[in-house]
Image (cartoon, rainbow, N blue to C red):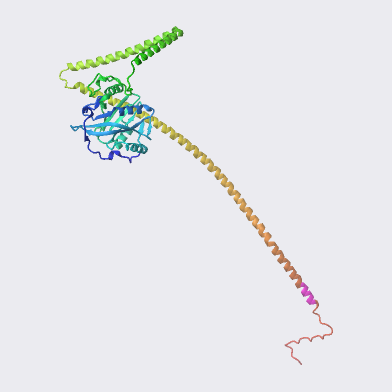
Amino acid sequence: MNDEIQFGEVEQAAPNRALRPDENRHYAVGAYGEPREGELAIYVDLDVLAEMEDHALSDTAVELGGVLLGGCYEDTEGRPFVIITDTLRAQHYESTKGSFKFTHDTWAAITRERDAFPAELQMVGWYHTHPDWGVFLSGMDMFICDNFFNKKLDVAYVIDPCRGDRGMFQWTGDDRHRVRRTGGFFVTASRFRAAELEHYLAELSSAMPATSMRTLSGSSSAPVVHLHQPRDPQPPWMQIAIIGGLALQFLLVALIAWKTLASSGDAQIAAALDKLSTSMKDERKAELAEARSRARAEFLDEAFRELKGTDKGAITKLQERFDKSEERKADVAARDAYIRELNKHLDTVKDDAAHEQKRLKDANEQLTLERNRLEKRTDVLLDENDKLKEEKKANQKVAGGSARNPYVWWWVAAGALIAVALVTGVWWIGGHSEPSPSEPAEPAQKPENVSSP
């Protein structure tokens, strides 16, 4: 996720004045949990709540999420409240079993989808799931709150579809404890769907009685209907047919069980009886533990009533401390689970790093072998090159000597011919230089230094 996206930096206008849904006769309102005085009142549309629950149950292997659309308002007394009337599922997100991240593609898809809604429908928070992790805000969740949903009235909704728990979180304005889980929130629907709203909240709350659901219709005797029941009434014979079919199935199952037990022998019957006895003992232990818990609580209440000088509201204060202690325990357990998940992820990263280091070491060894082979091959090539140079020089010498020999022999031959010619010439001149008999001999030259007589 890139830090460049900072929706929380946009200046928020002052909330508009509006009528609270529980003061509007158009709406039926029911409470999930126990919203406390002084907390931010949060109203969620029934269909929006059902949509988020369906999304949470669609995949419990990873975390899922989306954004909440609605508006922020103030009542006539200046008390702020938030109404959530729609939701957009996140697409192109990054998630694991223990983390959820918004990406640029997520925000691009949400922006495109928001263009189809009215301009007054704004983002008022976000929701995501914690499959079997409990309801809390992790470090990554707080990062998303700080950078994308950090306005004063922004909220965060966390669902644990595996444990059937869910809760709203609001900003506190306290630097030490910036967010806090609310005691509960309100669910709204049209007043014509009051019974439907009451039934759906009873299913979510499980142990919470349906009579605690507050509706403005004022009718506590409205029939409980399913959230998606058909509009056409059922024919009167339908119930008789269903009861008859169930009775027939029960008889068939009983007959099969009787046949099975009859043919399996005394050993299997004894094992079945032992199992039934063990189950009854366990149920009895659970009932006794619950009875002891109720008795202990009644005793403490009676003891505090008998104590003199006890401050007013001491039981309430103790209960609040107990609730806070339970919340801290839940936070610690969730944090421990988150740390275990991080440790598992760290072990996986370490294993991957060790594998990569081994692969890199093998690659380096292979590279060293290839380098040694290349060096040996280079030495061989250099030796062959030196041999080729020596052979080339020898060939050049032989070729040079062969090229000069013809000229030397020509000069030798020419010198020999010249010498023969000179010898022949001298011999021939010497043989023809004697005087002939007919020619008188020339007188001998007189010496210059001898005077005549």
Is residue 1 positioned above or below 27 on the image?
A: below
Q: Relative to residue 159, is residue 446 depicted above or below?
A: below
Task: Work out which residue is located at the far left of the displayed protein and give it.
Answer: 309
- Give the image location of residue 298, x and y in percent: 23, 15
| Quadrant of the image occupied by residue 36 | top left
In percent of width and height, residue 293 lies at: 27, 16
* Residue 289 visible in the shown view: yes
Where, quadrant-wise, is the N terminus in this rendering?
top left
Snapshot quadrant of residue 116: top left
Residue 427 highlighted magenta (yes or no): yes
Identify the residue at horizontal 38%, vertical 14% (top origin): 245
Q: Is residue 293 left or right of residue 426?
A: left
Residue 136 visible at all: no
Residue 278 picture quarter = top left
Q: Quadrant of the C terminus?
A: bottom right
Towards the viewer: 110 or 150:
110
